[in-house]
Image: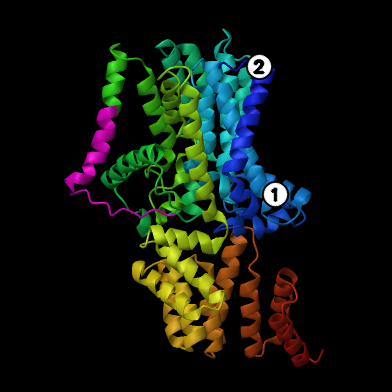
Amino acid sequence: MPVTGNRGRLAVLGLLLVCSLAAYWPALSRGGYIWDDDDYVSENPLLVEEGGLGRIWFEPKASPQYYPLVFTSFLIERQLLGFGPRGQHVTNVLLQVLNAFLLYLVLKRLGLRGALIAALIFALHPVMVESVAWITERKNLLSGCFVLLSLRFYLVAEDSTRAHPRAWYLALGAFVLALLSKTVAATLGPSFLLLAWWRRGRIGRLDLRRASPFFVLGAIGGIATAVIEVAGVQARGPEWDQGVLERILIAGRAVAFYAGKLAWPDPLLFNYPRWVVDVGSPGQWLYPLAVLAFGLSVSLAALRGRIGRGAATAFWLFVGTLFPALGFLNVYPMRYSFVADHFQYLAAIALIVPFAHHLDRIGRPGTRPALVAILVVCLGALSHRQCRLYENQEVLWRETLAGNPGSWIAANNLGMLSLRAGRIEEGRALVARALELAPQAREVLNNAGTIVADLDGDEEGALDLFRRAMKADPSYQDARTNLALMLVRLGRPAEAIPECDEAISRARALGKDYPQARWIKGRALHEMGRDAEALVEVERALARLGAQPELVALRDRIRRALGR
């Protein structure tokens, strides 16, 4: 039944809201913080300190990534709703509903059949759960919202004979906001040209004039993010040493992987196995060759008029939107896996839309609603089940390890959680397993060193592990401070002070302080009899960390030594 008018649109919005609340209810009712949510939200000082909003916008190094609109949304939530994940999960689900509704409006503007079906699939497909139930991935949701708004305004502008009507400026403004949320939006400019070709069979000068500012701004945003990923986020080293041919193999397999997960979303994992890439393996070349052959065949067929332009447009929109996550650029999560569900959040639309369009044409009109209802219920049930992964850290890593036994990050993180919970032997075994899987991983070496020092009392062995972690990544601050602490415990405080100074200097370069390093430095200075200097460092650490008993006791010892 056609849906028209404001009442019809409100009915669509209501349907999307009800279905999404049902599908994502586990995230709303039990969802907690996972993995890097502490850096982004729960322990982010920018959300509570005076001047935090200014630092979010004007100090790119102050945040884990320079996506100021995302951190501004977290700050506003913190001010309005206080501490806790529930409000943030509610916001994420509402953003997903809004994005699905915006997709519906865009498809109606394009005159495509199956707009409501596509919106429902996009809202409820379990591949989207990672972007919705993981608070940190607010990046995807906000960026997606502004991308779809930009596309909606741009389509209005396309129907004008003027190059820059008001709708075009609104589209450009929404695009800038999308880039400030996540620069995966950078591919929107080429998407506009593809849609122009699909609609009219050609790309004219007016199309190029309208799209060119989007190309320029997208290129600036994309290049800036690529530089930050390498220089700031540290997406460099042995894990990213692939050559051009290896990256082509990764990209080809990734495209096939993402299309396959849309068609058959089982199993879905938080951390998929990282492929061993071998340019000498003929089998691995089947992926990029098959992807390229399909793309060229549908494109040539469309250009010759043998088929419509829809298949070629959908293919290139899918691949083009995926491009930032195909392995040609260094992206930090690829240290753990070459693919992730949240990487295809927007790209998935390119395949969902033609599927929905054809689903709306098959069968008799009387049976079509039943088919759609079955599909919606199945997708909603799968998303409901997938949401349970995001209940807390332990559930996430246990489920990940069950689905991917080779996940060293899951073994490492679950091991440390087990140790903190008092399950000592389980924790030891898991960290040992992680070390076996990834003997050069800095976090695993650091955690293994902590275990050796605290549980076995082998401080020399711990020192060796911390040094290996530092060798793997000299910028890894946790290993550096643990190394300094171990030197103090071994009675070598003079060697510890340069390590603390280096840690403090690296933090200062990022616009941050490092109170843990000041604490250790204060202890080292105290043991060397330099109590006046030690007191300065300890009081600075107290100002940032609060009155922790061990730190207060150290301060009091130093004051007594100074006769105060």
Residue 167 position, x and y percent, is: 63, 18
Residue 221 seen anywhere in this rendered image of the structure = no
Residue 131 position, x and y percent, is: 53, 45
Tag 2, which secondary structure?
Answer: helix
- Are the residues at dot 1 and dot 2 in contact (C-beta closer than 8 Å)? no
Q: Range of the magenta residues? A: 271-294
Mark 1 or 2: in front is 1
Question: Which residue is under mark 2?
Answer: 166
Q: Closer to the N terminus: mark 1 or mark 2?
A: 1
Q: Is residue 21 above or below residue 304?
A: below
Q: Is residue 304 above or below residue 152?
A: above
Residue 467 seen anywhere in this rendered image of the structure = yes
Q: Residue 274: within the magenta?
A: yes
Q: Going 61% across and 57% down the picture, which residue do you hit?
A: 32
Instruction: Report the front residue among 499 and 104.
Output: 104
Residue 126 position, x and y percent, is: 48, 42
Q: Residue 424: within the magenta?
A: no
Q: Is residue 549 above or below residue 380?
A: below
Q: Is residue 393 above or below residue 368?
A: below
Q: Which mark is residue 87?
A: 1
